[in-house]
Image: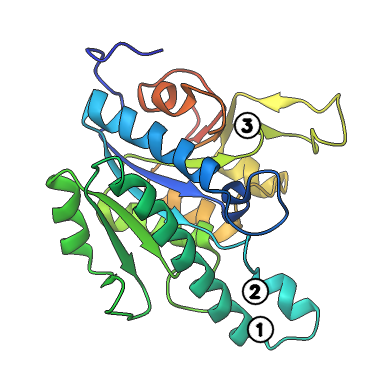
Amino acid sequence: MIKPSALPRYKRVLLKLGGEGLAGKAAFGIDPDVVNDIATDIVRVKRAHDTQFAIVVGGGNIIRGDAASKRGMDRVTADYMGMLGTVINALALQDALEKMDQPTRVQTAISMHQIAEPYIRRRAVRHLEKGRVVILAAGSGNPYFSTDTTAALRAVEIEAEVVLKATKVDGIYDDDPMTNPKAKRFTRLDYLDLINKDLRVMDHTAVTLCRENKIPIIVFDLSHEGHLEGVVAGKPIGTYVGSPE
């Protein structure tokens, strides 16, 4: 574990949480125990290091727009449904964080004033400066754009120092480690490697946004205790994606 006195390498981070990660071992839905574990990690790191957290949540545990469209649903309608799914996940995470006395704000790219604030960049930054966790939901508010692209876009807008992508595996591999035990894990990659090798950990638009704005991406397994704290502190965990050394 990182000592509380250690200075974090990253002060303001954009954490991307996939919706599937909130379902736990189930195929769909929300596992409250998993959400509580994630919230506990975030609160522990924030209090130990005063890290500013903005979080973009996916909605794949409820509905994936591209998958629904392949089964006959109108793509734009399916994508909007997926955006609403991310709001459900955001509210679940907010509830878990606030039960731990962590002030939190949910901002959405689609207006729904009864349950969340509209996304306003300056307001989001001000919340971060005041010590609140900001959860950004409803994607970018536009169909055909993934929540990975939203994470990269919001990271640029709020001037985050890094995009932390939490997945179910401990980094980026040259093949699926779930089906190929000989798959090789990369410790470091250039942005263009993700595109040229077609390593589908993030879509190309998201990677390009990060590359153009020199924001590194770290892909890691959030389920391992201490990994979030280690990544924030600059430990070599997961796969680092950035400019060539």
Q: Is residue 206 above or below residue 185?
A: below
Q: What is the spatial separation of the Cα atoms under label 3 and label 2, in whole angstroms? A: 25 Å
Q: Secondary structure at mark 1?
A: helix
Point out residue 8 in the picture as x, y percentages from the top left corner. Answer: 28, 23
Residue picked out by circle 2: 65
Do the residues bearing badges 1 and 2 touch, measured as CB atoms within 8 Å? yes
Q: Secondary structure at mark 3?
A: loop
Q: Which quadrant is home to the N terminus?
A: top left
Q: What is the spatial separation of the Cα atoms under label 1 and label 3, in whole angstroms? A: 30 Å
How busy is the neighbourhood of tag 2: few (under 14 within 10 Å), some, or many (20 plus)? many
Residue picked out by circle 1: 75
Residue in the foreground of this view, choosing between 244 and 83 = 83
Query: What residue is rendered at 62% in x and 61% in y?
Result: 60
Residue kind at label 2, given as amino acid type? Gly
Q: Is residue 10 visible?
A: no
Image side of residue 164 versus residue 118, left or right:
right
Residue picked out by circle 3: 171
Q: What is the spatial separation of the Cα atoms under label 1 and label 2, in whole angstroms? A: 6 Å
Q: Is residue 129 visible?
A: yes
Residue kind at label 3, given as amino acid type? Gly
- Label count reads 3
